[in-house]
């Protein structure tokens, strides 16, 4: 397992991306999977900076990477304000762009591009987002339980 700590600041998003991409450089992900991983990590860390720390340049983001024979597990940890994923509404993807909310697509995007995305609050005071990307793409199930 590889771990790293970064200041929760926008100017460190590139360093976070480099850490993750360097860790998987020899892994059998295709270009689309690599892009999805980079996009999800960037969005998740931006959300931590925005919401957990209020953009205050305070705190840190911890990244834990576990690469095995099936794929990659990324755990993103912070000590900021707790996040309640139940409060995130499904984005409106059908209305005209000018009438849609300007924000709120991050969680949706992360769930769409990763094979698994789950929030874990089992450690008191620590927010964790666990992302998984398998080497072989899996067929996701729709919300009603059918693929």
Image (tube, rainbow, N blue to C red):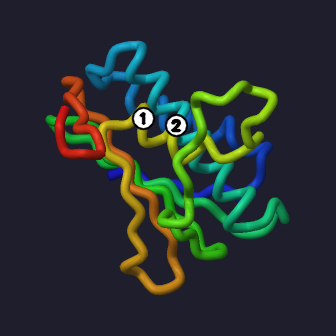
Relative side of 50 to 31, left or right: right
Nearer to us in this view, 45 or 96: 96
Q: Which residue is mark 1?
A: 112
As drawn, the residue found furthest toward the right would be 56
Most extreme residue toward the bottom is 124
Depth order, front residue of 132/111: 111
Position of 58 with respect to 117 (left or right) is right
Q: In the rendering, at what x and y percent does residue 114 appear?
A: 38, 36
Q: Is residue 80 above or below residue 89?
A: below
Coordinates of residue 2 in the picture (x, y in percent): 39, 50
**Residue 25 got which mark?**
none
Residue 79 in the image: state x and y as whole percent.
Answer: 60, 74
Query: CA–CA distance between discs 1 and 2?
Result: 5 Å
Mark 1 Cα shell of 10 Å, populated few (<14), some (14-19), many (≥20): some
The 10 Å Cα crowd at callout 2, few under 14, some 14 to 19, many 20 or more, is some
Specify whether 72 is left or right of 68. right
Q: Quadrant of the C terminus?
A: top left
To which residue does mark 2 refer?
109
The kind of secondary structure element at disc 2 is helix
Q: Are the residues flagged by discs 1 and 2 in contact, CB closer than 8 Å? A: yes
Residue at horizontal 73 percent and vertical 67 percent from the top: 53
Residue at x 79%, y 65% (from the top left corner): 54
Q: Secondary structure at mark 1?
A: helix
- Residue 105 in the image, given as x and y percentages of width and height: 61, 41
Residue depicted at 65% across the width and 73% down the height: 80
Q: Does 120 appear above or below 35?
A: below
- On screen, residue 15 above or below 25: below
Give me the residue at 54% from left, 60% from top. 62
**Which quadrant holds residue 52?**
bottom right
Q: Quadrant of residue 102?
A: top right
Foreground of the two, 115 or 90: 90
Viewer-proximal residue among 38 and 114: 114
């Amino acid at each position: 397992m590889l771990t790293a700590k970064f200041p929760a600041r926008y100017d460190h998003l590139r360093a976070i991306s480099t850490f993750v991409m360097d860790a998987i450089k020899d892994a059998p992900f295709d270009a689309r999977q690599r892009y999805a991983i980079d996009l999800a990590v960037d969005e998740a860390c931006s959300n931590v900076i925005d919401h957990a720390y209020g953009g205050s340049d305070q705190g840190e983001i911890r990244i834990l990477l576990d690469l095995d024979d099936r794929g990659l597990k990324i755990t993103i940890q912070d000590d900021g304000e707790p996040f309640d994923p139940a409060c995130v509404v499904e984005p409106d993807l059908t209305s005209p762009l000018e009438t849609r909310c300007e924000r709120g697509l991050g969680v949706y995007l992360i769930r769409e591009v990763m094979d698994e995305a789950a929030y874990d609050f089992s450690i008191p005071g620590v927010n964790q987002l666990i992302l998984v990307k398998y080497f072989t793409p899996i067929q996701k199930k729709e919300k009603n339980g059918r693929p």
